[in-house]
Amino acid sequence: MAAAVLSAPARARAEASGGERGRYVHLFGTAAVGRGLRLNNPYRLETVLGRDAESLSLSAWYADVGLGATLGDPEGWQHGVVVRESHALDGVPQDVVTPGYTLLRRFRPRYQAFARAGVPVVVRPDLSWGLEAAIGGVWLVTAALGCTAEVVGSVFYGAATWDRAATAIPIVSLQLGAWLDAELLP
């Protein structure tokens, strides 16, 4: 494993070796902490920001960890898969697993941008699901360790309340964390 993009001399050596070039694989892991803003509050949850119990409210603080892998051009667009797990740090115990698709692009040696889309599955306290999309960036402090920021938009479908047959809870979150980067060079 190496943690650097193929430089022009490295690419020339690989091509000059006469052998067939292997496939570039980008592996990464994430660990972050975040908090969201619920755009409606059908369950009248705590931390209400508006005038009544059904207005904007803050979600619980949560921890999010993930693993991902992409294939593609080391200096261009890379497509892959990612799986994330989120765990509520306060309030109602909740665990969410989100498998999804990710798109990653390196900009200069120390900067990366990514987007992802997935289907979050709430596994605790009650089984439910939703849709999620996110966009973020990475600043690599070293070749393998970086800082990340991500904006996440989600909508979760929930159980009925006294005044609604079914609920949809849109949430916009911000999470900050660490990024562990590894590349398998051809």
Image (cartoon, rainbow, N blue to C red):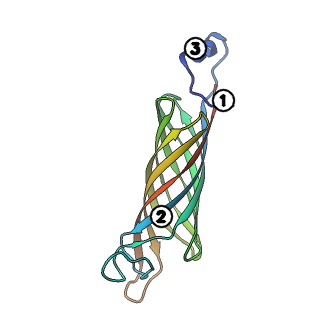
Which tag, 1 or 2, sits closer to the chain's start? Answer: 1
Q: In the rendered structure, find residue 19 and report the number of the disc placed on it.
A: none
Q: Quadrant of residue 96?
A: bottom right
Question: Residue placed at 47% from the left, 76% from the top?
Answer: 158
Mark 2, secondary structure of its residue: strand
Residue annotated with mark 2: 35
Residue annotated with mark 3: 9
Outermost residue toward the right in this view: 1
Q: Residues within 10 Å of mark 3 (few under 14, many from 20)?
A: few
Please state which of the two labelled residues, at mark 3 or mark 2, is closer to the viewer: 2
Residue type, numbered disc 2? Arg
Mark 3, secondary structure of its residue: helix
* Screen quadrant of the C terminus: top right
* Screen quadrant of the N terminus: top right
Residue type, numbered disc 3? Pro
Q: In the rendered structure, find residue 2 and report the number of the disc placed on it.
A: 1
Disc 1 to disc 2, C-alpha distance: 34 Å
Question: Residue placed at 36% from the left, 83% from the top?
Answer: 53
Mark 1, secondary structure of its residue: loop
Q: Is residue 77 above or below residue 136?
A: above
Outermost residue toward the front in this view: 141
Pick the residue in front: 62 or 163: 62
Outermost residue toward the left in this view: 51
The answer to whether 28 appears left or right of 164 in the picture is right
Please state which of the two labelled residues, at mark 1 or mark 2, is closer to the viewer: 2
The x, y position of residue 94, in whole percent, is 58, 71
Which tag, 3 or 1, sits closer to the chain's start? Answer: 1
Question: Residue placed at 41% from the left, 82% from the top?
Answer: 44
Residue type, numbered disc 1? Ala
The answer to whether 172 appears left or right of 28 in the picture is left
Q: Residues within 10 Å of mark 2 (few under 14, many from 20)?
A: many
